[in-house]
Amino acid sequence: MNSLKNLTLRWCDCITDASLIHVLNISTLQFLSISGCRKLTGDGISNLVRHRNLKMLELTHCPNATVKVKAYLKQNLVNCILLD
């Protein structure tokens, strides 16, 4: 997946923190939607700060994307727009 730029995983009940780790290996990824992925924890979502190429991250309807998690993401992904 050398050229994947957009990945939409909206409302995927099977997405967990463990599966989200694999997304970090997609170095070309710029847009990620994990809206409605209710099994993701705050820790799993916070791991996305390691993906410095993200330009847009959609987090709507993620119950564990708390205000604290979103603030952490905004602080560490300065070139990324968070849609929440």
Image: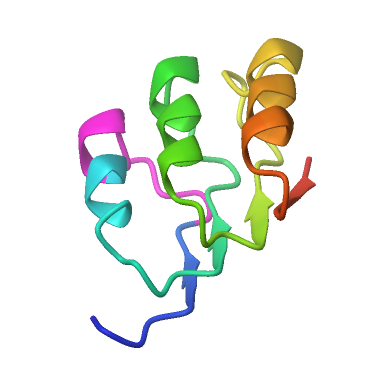
Residue, far top: 68
4 vs 67: above or below? below
> What residue sits 70% from the left and 11% below the top?
68
* Viewport quadrant of the C terminus: top right
> What residue sits 40% from the left and 75% below the top?
28
> What residue sits 71% from the left and 41% below the top?
60
Q: Give the range drawn in magenta.
A: 10-19
> What residue sits 22% from the left and 51% below the top?
22
- What's the coloring here? rainbow
43 vs 39: above or below? above
**Residue 14 visible at all:** no
Whether residue 57 appears in magenta in the rendering, the answer is no
15 with respect to 7 (left or right) = left
In the rendered image, residue 56, in percent from the top left (x then y), is placed at 68, 60
70 with respect to 47 (left or right) = right
In the rendered image, residue 9, in percent from the top left (x then y), is placed at 45, 58
9 with respect to 3 (left or right) = right
